[in-house]
Image (cartoon, helix red, strand yellow):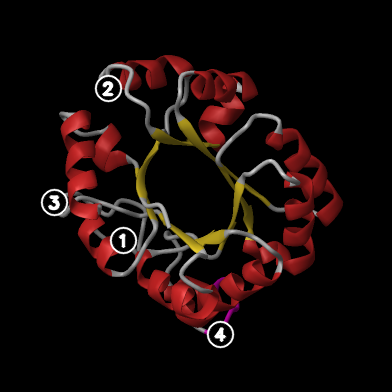
Amino acid sequence: MDRGVIIACDFSSRGELEEFLWMFGGRSLFLKVGMELFYSEGPDLVRKLKERGHSIFLDLKLHDIPNTVMRTMKVLSALRIDMCNVHGAGAVTMMRAAREGAGDSGIKLLAVTQLTSISEKQLRDELLIDGGMEDTVLKYGINAWEAGLDGVVCSTWEAEGIHRTCGQDFITVVPGIRLREDLTDDHSRVATPEEARKQGADYIVVGRSITKANDPVRAYERCLKEFL
């Protein structure tokens, strides 16, 4: 299983992104393009980034009726992205439709289990899910595996259980990663790159600890050193 550090490009415009990428001097990176940047700049931005040799995790968290998700995945597949995700809450039928829409494009298709901003208390009190965080994430992972997806997005603390149940080849992509001295911000289930490595995560997604650092390149290199 390949492992790597994905940079969360949570910028509002292409200009901000280009200013950030300039510091890396043309180096090929694994970039996460989320809703803000995708809705601001559109699919052409993704095409340009791919042409420049970057790997792309398109983080749109598709969650709709199965037919809509299937047709949307067909459109996104044409962008030659490397990863994309759907919401595990859409259940097995929707995830199977996403798999069908991706076809033989080679996209690694992931299911979002629970956002790392969601706490155990919110899971119980606001979402009315009584199974607990670990059991809920594991069940969503099992559903994704049964639907033929390639892996899940989960917190560091569920990665080991996902691998134990769904297999070592089932990808775990872990957001909510911070360097030790950084604030947790709006994530409640956070970890350092080193902790994610010890828990068996395959990929970590790092945003503000790199993009808001005084020296983003140095912060990225530190994440690589601690995780790989």
SS for dot 1: loop
- Compute the Cα span from label 1 to label 3: 12 Å
Name the residue carrying label 4.
130
**Mark 2 against mark 4, which lies toward the viewer?**
2
Mark linked to residue 181: 3
Name the residue carrying label 2.
24
Question: Type of residue at label 1?
Answer: Val
Whether residues under marks 4 and 3 lie with C-beta atoms below 8 angstroms apart, the answer is no
Within-10-Å neighbours for mark 4: few <14, some 14–19, many 20+: few
Question: Type of residue at label 3?
Answer: Glu
For marks 1 and 3 on the same chain, the one whose residue lies earlier in the sequence? 3
Majority secondary structure in the magenta region: loop
Whether residues under marks 2 and 3 lie with C-beta atoms below 8 angstroms apart, the answer is no
Question: Type of residue at label 2?
Answer: Phe
Magenta-tinted stretch: 126-131
* Residue in view at x 27 percent, y 17 percent: 25
Within-10-Å neighbours for mark 1: few <14, some 14–19, many 20+: many
- Compute the Cα span from label 2 to label 3: 23 Å
* Residue in view at x 48 percent, y 73 percent: 162
SS for dot 3: loop
Front one among 186 and 107: 107
Please tell me whether residue 123 is drawn above or below residue 215 in the rendered image.
below
Q: Residue furthest bottom?
A: 131
